[in-house]
Amino acid sequence: MDRLPSAPICVVTGGEPLLYQERAAFPALLRMIRDRGTQVHIETNGTIVPTPEVEGLVDLFVVSPKLAHAHAQKGRMTPALANGWSDVASRSNAHLKIVVETRDDVIEASAIAASSGWNRQRIWVMPEGVDTATLDRRWPDVCAWAIEAGVNVTHRLHVLAWGEERGH
């Protein structure tokens, strides 16, 4: 363990990490990360609410429900957040991040947030796209729609940097 490099943040993501929170190894891993002085961030699709134990071990939740355009990633998910996320968001550092294609998607993202009582300052939309050309084309519109809706906008930096290449 002492040979592992130190990092200020560890992001736990991929699939749905909260599926494993009931296993003893999951909170143990989060404790081990924190004991190294590293912040724990969890990226989740919002279909599962963290247990109180896990919530207490996480510095930041990024909750990213999938809208209808997500198709293959979405599977059987609805964009609705699991009951309890509004409570988590009110007492923890939690941000809502939604990938959008259209103005209606931004409106839907705002509605999801409003229905769960999410603080507007913690709502982020980003353009859908897996290549730079698509992101460049969508970026100005998504920025305008986010301003209209009163939410934040961010880019998909991993796509700009690496495209569809996996492993980063």
Image (cartoon, helix red, strand yellow):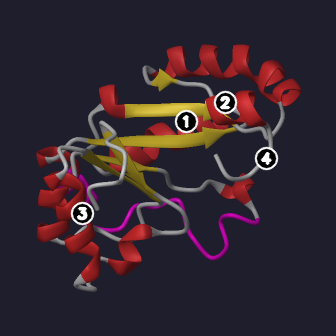
Disc assigned to residue 30: 3
Label 1 – label 3 distance at C-alpha:
35 Å
Q: Residues within 10 Å of mark 3 (few under 14, many from 20)?
A: many
Overall secondary structure of the magenta section: loop
Residue type of the residue flagged with mark 4 = Glu
Upstream in sequence: badge 1 or badge 3: 3
The residue tagged 1 is 107
Residue 50, image x and y in percent?
A: 25, 67
Disc assigned to residue 132: none
Q: Nearer the viewer, mark 2 or mark 3?
A: 3
Q: Residues within 10 Å of mark 2 (few under 14, many from 20)?
A: some
Residue type of the residue flagged with mark 3 = Leu
Look at the numbered disc 1 and give the secondary structure of its residue. Answer: helix
Residue 100 versus residue 48 in the image, above or below: above
Look at the numbered disc 3 and give the secondary structure of its residue. Answer: helix
Residue 130, image x and y in percent?
A: 79, 41
Query: Is residue 80 found inside the magenta-colored segment of the image?
Result: yes
User: On the rendered structure, is 45 left or right of 57?
Assistant: right
